[in-house]
Amino acid sequence: MLRAYPNGSSEALDRAWWIDLHDPTDEEKARIAERFRITVPDRAALSEIELSSRLRSLERVLYMSAPLVARDEDGEDALTPVGFILSPDVLVTVRFAASGAFEAVHEEMGRGDAPKSPAEALIRLLEEIVDRAADRFERAAEKVNNASRAVFSQEAGKRKRRLGRETRRLRGLMVQAGRTSEQLVRVRHSILSIARIATFVPDRCEPKLDKELCDRLASINHDIDSLDQFEQTLSGRVQFVLDAATGFLSIEQNDVVKVLTVVSVAGVPPVLVVGIYGMNFHYMPELSWGWGYFYALALVVISTIVPIAWFKWRDWL
């Protein structure tokens, strides 16, 4: 799909200074390349990770690309490549997935209160992308807070749950924290790429940007620095929650193993007593005792209680 601004029509390319290509066809790419004498990259070219491939200047035209977070076909967040081609006359954006940031700027263009030049349109897009990245970080922080409260809740510690239920609960929290960590990595990767673009444009753009636009790009870099620090702190909290959940799960399992160990140890002496008095020797002194049976039972009980009392005394139970 091709949208050209200022009027949003796909036909008026002569007066357009921003052209947004969403999953473009070969015909659309050829049309733009011929009209503006630029090279419209395909998805493979935009996916290259080398810095020299993502940021290039050729004959007063800046070719830039960055991975942005977007919804995939399964409704999950994924990184998708986006290209920005900035020339003195036009901004061409190439993307292959729906983007809330682009749609927001499109709506502004429809209201007539949006950018009026190619460079300003690029800066407005970068600002919107960073704003939405901040929103994603805020939602991720809320998820981490919820997971942390669930792991360290006093009520959760007081309630006695069966091991299977507690394992499933902690496993669910670990999955939630792990998915949040993956989201943070994707968003951080995206905004760091945007930061490189915000630094590259004022150095290489021709004609040179005025002070107001340069200040806006500097503000974008400051915001990204702040978000980067926030992401590092949040990632540390995610790792702490994961470690705590793993530790609590190990404690629960160790408690079960400890009980099984105590039971097995406490069961050895009674088995020994029963084994002795179950032997089929002709002469056994206790065989003729009138209280021999009750003596053996008492010995079994005492031999069971003594190890348990020992574990209690040693504070192992």
Image: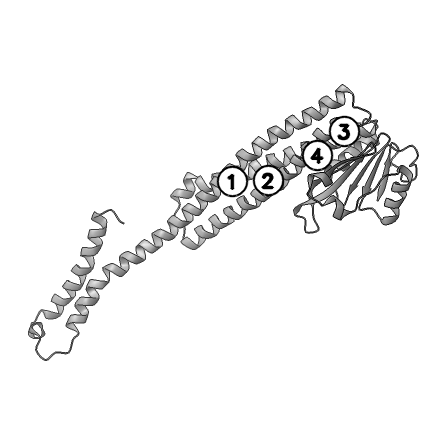
Query: Where does label 2 land, which residue?
Result: 184
Q: Mark 3 or mark 4: which comes first in sequence? A: 4
Q: Mark 3 or mark 1: which comes first in sequence? A: 3
Query: Where does label 1 land, which residue?
Result: 238
Amino acid marked by disc 3:
Arg
Work out how far the residue at label 3 is from the one at label 4, CA to CA, in angstroms.
Answer: 21 Å
Which mark, residue 273?
Answer: none
Q: SS class of the residue under badge 4?
A: helix
Work out how far the residue at label 4 is from the one at label 2, CA to CA, in angstroms.
Answer: 15 Å
Please determine whether, in this image, residue 289 is positioned above or below residue 256.
below
Residues marked 1 and 2 touching at CB (< 8 Å): yes
Q: Residues within 10 Å of mark 1 (few under 14, many from 20)?
A: many
Q: Mark 1 or mark 2: which comes first in sequence? A: 2
Q: What x and y, as percent, mark residue 299?
A: 14, 63
Q: Comparing marks 3 and 4, which lies closer to the viewer? A: 3
Q: SS class of the residue under badge 2?
A: helix
Q: Residues within 10 Å of mark 2 (few under 14, many from 20)?
A: many
Residue beneath the point at 41% across and 53% down: 163
Nearer the observer, 269 or 302: 269
Q: Residues within 10 Å of mark 4 (few under 14, many from 20)?
A: many
Residue beneath the point at 49% across and 41% down: 239
Amino acid marked by disc 4:
Ile
Query: Where does label 4 land, which residue?
Result: 129
Q: Mark 4 or mark 2: which comes first in sequence? A: 4
299 relative position to 167: left or right = left
Which mark, residue 204?
Answer: 3
Q: Mark 4 or mark 1: which comes first in sequence? A: 4
Please determine whether, in this image, residue 229 is positioned above or below residue 31.
above
Work out how far the residue at label 2 is from the one at label 3, CA to CA, in angstroms.
Answer: 30 Å
